[in-house]
Amino acid sequence: MAVNSFKFMSRTLAESLKVWPYVDTSGEPIPWAEPRKPLKESTVALVSSGGLYHRDDTPFDLDRERAEPLWGDPSFREVPRDISQEEVRIAHLHYDNSHALDDCNCILPLAALDAALAEGRIGNIAERHLTFMGYQPRLGTFVRETAPRMADRMLEMDVDVVLLSSG
Amino acid sequence: MESRGLVTVSLTNMPFVTEKIGVPRAVAVEFPFGMIWGHPDDREMQGRLLEHMFELVETATEPGTVVELPYTWPEEDFRKRDWFPKEPTPWLASQEGIDQMLDFLQHGDPMD
């Protein structure tokens, strides 16, 4: 493997992730959907686990994480596709937010997606992108409630292709 | 999402984890947290990564396809180590938090 997964971590975090109790997915096949239409006719949405939210929305709950360090806010937020940099806020305690607060495109590539639409590479951009805060040691609520609701929202917005990235 | 008919592609900087849990399609970059799409204002890199993901939508034929990209973080930027949070991460900030994490690593149920 050429990409070093641990290059940007403290040793403590790297050693933790090497022995992390990942959800055991070995017994089930990886889900797979075939694209139903060409990309140039597809609606594309972004999902980011970077903790980004609109300034008028409720922040992810960091105070509870500070009090209960093994808890991470399992909810998600929606951000309009034309959110401006001034409207971007971030609540995530596991990376330096300042770069994305200067230019959120380094965690949510809105400008590049607009360019892809202008070039006709994709058919449309979803009205809203979805975000959550990716520190989720206990995934139960996220997997059982949040993720299905995020999928519902994608389908309601007629999304075909979802691009997911971390903070 | 994929089981509901949505086609997904992930951008990851931790292919170790991505391959362990299994995702339909992913591209991997060796970029730091908080800048996984490249440096702020680097529209060219953001466009390139987007295009790599689009190509994977068009070409991947089986689930679990992870494509590692050759881009590297510049050495002079690596030395800045400017991706670590300014406020200490809660579980690392106290011995109590570290003990809770150690207990989770040994006995925790991730589906709690």
Image (cartoon, rainbow, N blue to C red):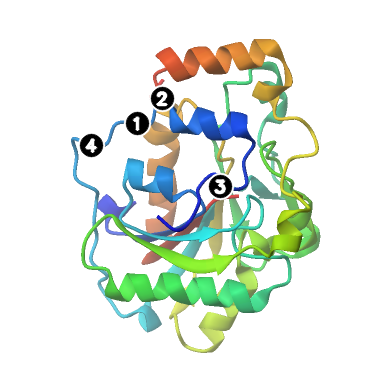
Which of the two marks, 3 or 1, is nearer to us in this view?
1
Of badges 4 and 3, nearer the viewer stands 4
Q: Are callouts 3 and 1 both on one chain? A: yes
The residue nearer to you, when weighing B48 against A101, is B48
Query: From this viewpoint, which residue is outermost toward the bottom?
Result: A119
Image quarter of residue B75:
bottom right
Instruction: Give the residue type that dot 4 points to.
Output: Ser
Q: Which residue is mark 2?
A: B110
User: Disc 1, disc 2: CB below 8 Å?
Assistant: yes
Sequence-wise, which precedes: disc 3 or disc 1?
1
Q: Is residue B79 left or right of residue A151?
A: right
Cα distance between the residues tagged 4 and 2:
15 Å
Q: Which residue is mark 3?
A: A49
Separation (CA) of disc 1 from disc 4: 9 Å
Whether label 1 touches label 4, CB < 8 Å: no
| x, y percent for residue B15 | 43, 50
The quarter in which the C terminus of chain B is drawn is: top left
> According to the image, label 1 marks what residue?
A23
- Residue B63: give x, y in percent of width and height: 24, 57
Q: Are marks 3 and 2 in contact (CB under 8 Å)?
A: no
Q: CA distance from mark 3 to mark 2?
A: 18 Å
Q: Chain of mark 4?
A: A
Q: Are marks 3 and 2 on the same chain?
A: no
Under mark 1, the amino acid is Val
Residue occupying the point 35% across, 71% down: B56
Q: Residue at horizontal 67%, vertical 31%?
A: A61
Q: Which residue is mark 4?
A: A26
Give the class, few, some or many, for how many residues have Cα within 10 Å of label 2's Cα (few <14, many ≥20).
some
Q: Chain of mark 3?
A: A
